[in-house]
Amino acid sequence: MDRNTQRYTVFETALGFCGIAWSEAGITSLRLPDKTAEATERAVRRRAPDAEPGTPPPMVADVVVAVKRYFAGAVTDFADVTLDLDGQDAFFAQIYAAARRVGWGHTTTYGALTKELGAGPEVARDVGQAMAHNPVPLIIPCHRVLAAGGKIGGFSAPGGAATKMKMLELEGVHLAPPPPAQRAFDF
């Protein structure tokens, strides 16, 4: 397989079907859970139209196992996964590197990532665009990047913001206000 050839596979997790594509250089795409294998495969093929179905090599097979563990609720770290982000905008690559440092059970905001990159508030929109175009969500944990004030913000994966909330809940992050400690007495 040469560097530009891509392969993909679709696999089932506790939350639905995921898809992963790879090249010789690393993971090129990850599709978060969808309801059917067919919908997942269509989405993977849209992102990687020249990719062919394939049997994952050991490094990719390890990522598939890790994704399954993640969606089963196990603490999982994707920081060492090798990615092939060839062709990505250089600034997006910096944003992705910063987002990858946000670990399990933690969140940040678009504004905080902007500050980490040494940029002004006008760049927060670019951070949002990078997250919306993230080719490997979960590995680059865009679900951990929130809007100002800790609001959930958008999410372009199947299920939208509800999927983002579910992923954060798997990690023990609860954004809804806690229930009241005591209810009013009913007389």
Image (spheres, helix red, strand yellow):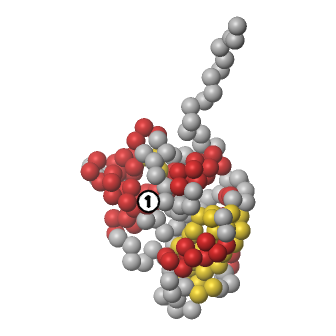
- Which of the two residues, 72 or 115, is positioned nearer the viewer here? 72
Residue 50 screen position, x and y as percent: 51, 87
Rendered view: 26 above or below 124: below
Outermost residue toward the front?
187
Q: Residue 165 vs residue 145: left or right?
A: right
Q: Quadrant of the C terminus?
A: top right
In the rendered image, which quarter is residue 26 located in?
bottom right
Tell me, yes or no, if residue 131 can be seen here. Answer: yes
Rendered view: 60 above or below 78: below
Q: Residue at x 71, y 68 (%)?
A: 12
Rendered view: 121 above or below 93: above
Q: In the image, what residue type sits under mark 1?
A: Met
Q: Residue at x 61, y 72 (%)?
A: 39
Rendered view: 115 above or below 132: above
Per the image, label 1 sits on a secondary structure element best described as helix
Other residues around mark 1 within 10 Å, as few (<14) / some (14–19) / many (≥20) = many
Q: Which residue is mark 1?
A: 131
Q: Residue at x 59, y 39 (%)?
A: 174
Q: Residue 20 vs residue 13: left or right?
A: left
Tell me, yes or no, if residue 66 can be seen here. Answer: no
Residue 83 screen position, x and y as percent: 51, 72
